[in-house]
Image (cartoon, rainbow, N blue to C red):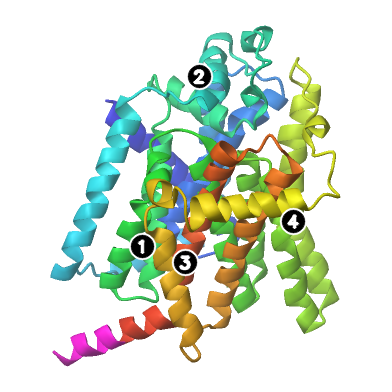
Amino acid sequence: MQLLIAILLLVLQAIAGFGVLCLLRIYLKPGFFISLSVLIGVAVFSLVPFLLQLAYVPLTAFNVFASLIAVSFLLNIKSKRGAVHLFNSLKNYRFRLKLYEVPSLFLILLMIFVSVWRCYYYPPTPRDLTSGAEVIAEYAVKEKTMINSVFTVDLSTTNNQFKPPFLTCLQIIYKYAGFPFGQIWLSGVFIFFTIFLYTALNTRLHKIITGLLLVMFIAIPEMYGYTLMALFDYSNAVFFCLSIYFLIEYFTNGKNNHIILSGLLMAVATYVRSETLILAGLVFPVVLFHHWRRKNISSLLKSTTYFFIPSVIIYLLSITIYINYYLPSLYKIDSLLNTNLADLNLFYQRLSDVTGKYLLAGNVLDHYGYFVFIFVIVLCADAFRKNSLNRTSLNWLWAVFIIFAGIPLIGFLFPLYDLDHSTKRGLLKIFPLMLLYMANSGFLVSISDDIKKWERSQ
């Protein structure tokens, strides 16, 4: 019964996300279309209970699920063309499985199965969850509001109750659906992000290389651990990566609907973790530079609105307004800011610590395995190989650099964003970007082309 309920929720999420893509007139290959529909649907689901709370509507099971169904179908008022496109794509799709794909696909499916089972079977245990989203969701189900008796308890030793309600809302939905631990929604994010990455890698690389890279990516110890712990960081990395993907697509084709989707996905990433707004600010100069090179002021103003404004709006709603005007406890974010911003040595020290302890030395193997070193090897191969660095790969490399410098910058601005916890988890955002850089690596694309030529000649 629970499996059926999980599938029905997944289908409803796919319907909601499909409607968003159709409203934006974004029609993609089936692998992209289906995976993005589910991921965007999860984001839509996470907003519905929050908006009900802002309107002071009681969070009863009926109100929550009626709203989810209504929103999902209202988003599909213009989905006929998208449905036809998807139907024709699936009708013409021919699934071919080569023998050399089996080992990597077997490993990927095995790791997914283990993650999903542990996510379903084990209760949430991380302190960040049990002292924040999980306990608020548990009492929200009992008291029909997220502003519940949790806030009458002395929680002065933590700030987890003040984090954005992304997790809380999803926990509420899945608890009402009959999952006592709630967190099975995370498995949907993990599975369909993996499908998205597999599809993206296959567009440029041979499936042997795709399989190897994806196995190594999923097997990153720290990242894999967060596919079964319902915390903010894996989902944040997913939506940040998707936002960058469609921003780079916009740089390539100039279609406004792609930068609109990129801005909405960045807003979701900000909704998951509010400090992502700083990273969005670091990405934004790239958008400015793109239009400055083309001397197009009107497009620049549109891009500013499309890309950055949604993140600002969601930040104001989920942090400024919700915390200050809805929650009974005060939380002064200004008090968390570094009071000595003129001392840049603190930033350089944090950058050095991140590099020396987590990325290139120190505990890198324990937390992130060999994935960083594989990325560095591919990067060096591209650097020393003529014409390997194309515009798309340089854009992905710039995105990697933004996280590399941006995470230490957040730690510099907010000392509470410590090295061994928040920073270590924040670095999860860098690995999907590294993976998609390698998907566009001239060195790996050249090897892939050679393998394809050899394969055709047999």
Q: Is residue 308 left or right of residue 455?
A: right
Residue type at mark 3 is: Leu
- The mark nearer the N terminus, 2 or 4, is 2
Q: Measuring 25% from the left and 84% from the top, which residue is drawn there?
A: 451
- The mark nearer the N terminus, 2 or 1, is 2
The residue at which mark 4 appears reads as 281
Say whether residue 18 is visible.
no
> Which range of residues does the magenta coloring cover?
450-458
The residue at which mark 1 appears reads as 198
Q: Check contact, mark 2 vs mark 1: CB within 8 A.
A: no
Q: Secondary structure at mark 1?
A: helix
Q: CA distance from mark 2 to mark 4?
A: 38 Å
Q: Is residue 221 above or below residue 118?
A: below
Give the image location of residue 275, x and y in percent. Answer: 68, 43
Query: How many numbered marks have been drawn onto this rendered protein structure?
Result: 4
- As for residue 455 lying within the magenta part, the answer is yes
Q: Is residue 118 left or right of residue 173?
A: left
Q: Check contact, mark 3 vs mark 4: CB within 8 A.
A: no
Quadrant in which the C terminus appears:
bottom left
Give the label, 4 or 1, closer to the camera: 4
Give the label, 3 or 2, closer to the camera: 3
Q: CA distance from mark 4 to mark 1?
A: 29 Å
Give the label, 3 or 1, closer to the camera: 3
Closer-to-camera residue (240/83): 240
